[in-house]
Amino acid sequence: MRTPARKFLAIGLSAVALSLAGVPSHGQQVVRIGASSPLTGISASNGKDLENGVRLAVEEANAQHIKLGGQDVRFELDTVDDQGDPRIGVQVAQKLVDDGVVAVVGYYNSGVALPSAPIFAKAGIPLIDPAATNPAITRQGLKTVFRIIATDAQNSGNAGTYAVTVMKARRIAVMDDRTAFGQGAVEEFKKAVIAAGGRIVAAEYTNDKAVEFNAQLTNIKAANADLLYFGGLDNQAALLVKRMKQLGMRVQFVGSGGIADSIFLNVAGPAAEGAMAWEYGRPIDTLPQGKAFAQKFRKRFGVEMLTYSPFSYDCVRVVIHAMRQANSAKPAEFLPALRATRYEGITGQIAFDANGDLEHPTSTLYQVKGGRWAPVTTIGTE
């Protein structure tokens, strides 16, 4: 029979054991970094690509055995599937806050980023954006939002100016997928076209799940357009180009960001030839660390990278760099270092302006030649 003293001792020891169960040994601190992207649905391939970039950076950081505040650090990745849906995005954003993440890498979709960013700002958690490009994301007055990719104002603005001044397009049509990204990209393109003295002869739209575009393309053909700028993503853009080919349309297709990848080529097939798209940043293989990154990504995940993994990788690197500068993983302590970032990443020089956007963004125009995307020109402020 257990005596009362022994009984209370056993209870006390059990409580201590439970309280220590979640504490890392040897003074190691666990630092959680969140990542939000669409891991299911039509954009799952790009969402997984984004997540893999984050995962690779976290694994490499752990291999470096980083210390902060005199303690060993183990970084943990906390990923959520926002499904490309603003409603789901808000829910999983709150989950990341509740999980105790100290920084978040996201988003792929601008429509998800816009309502989710204030949730992290309220909690004082920095959000570093690798892919969502609507200018409004960094215009909400939030001091915790940063973006390491050109905005639609820059990328689509370059596209509009180039269409008029270099491509000499005289009758320009536009079409978007009614998402925050697609609409935003087309609006910025239109502004640039008009500012350059160009003319918009047709403006059409669809939705991001549509697979049939006969009505829109009939109107564009009737307007005798010589160039079509599409604000949308790779899979749908490929279906659109295929239908244009079937209808015998001799209209130059130019896409917004998120199109110049292998998904577009595979879906469009031979119809892809000659298509153009503006993407963010410089061609990865022209950057000092670009080829090495592509090789290690392929070795780690067994697939070729898509558009955004280099950017999501750099998001993590920039955050950890700021932590090391501040010698702390507490957001309130490393946020000033994050704002003052001067970092040479895979994607180029990273430094932020007052809004949290890149100081020196660049855009590259690509065209499908011989079944592959080939760079045509790069425009930027660097």
Image (tube, rainbow, N blue to C red):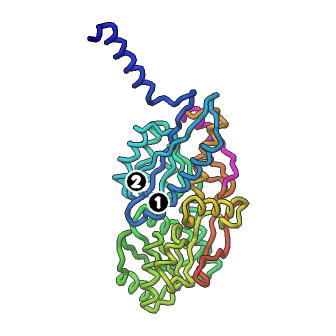
Q: Is residue 271 above or below residue 291?
A: below
Q: Amino acid at mark 2?
A: Asp
Of residues 331 and 269, the one drawn nearer to the viewer in this rendering: 269
Decide if residue 356 is in sight here: no
Mark 2: few, some, or many residues within 10 Å (few <14, many ≥20)? many
**In the rendered structure, which segment of residues is drawn in magenta?**
330-345
Q: Residue at x 66, y 76 (%)?
A: 376
User: Where does the image place residue 166, in percent across and percent down from the top left?
Assistant: 65, 79
The residue pinned by badge 1 equals: 47
Say which quadrant the C terminus sits in: bottom right
Please, which residue is most extreme toward the front here?
1
Farthest residue, direction left:
1
Report x, y in % for residue 233.
46, 69
User: Mark 2–mark 1 contact, CB under 8 Å?
Assistant: yes
Q: Residue at x 55, y 84 (%)?
A: 273
Residue 236 as seen in the image, left or right of residue 306: left
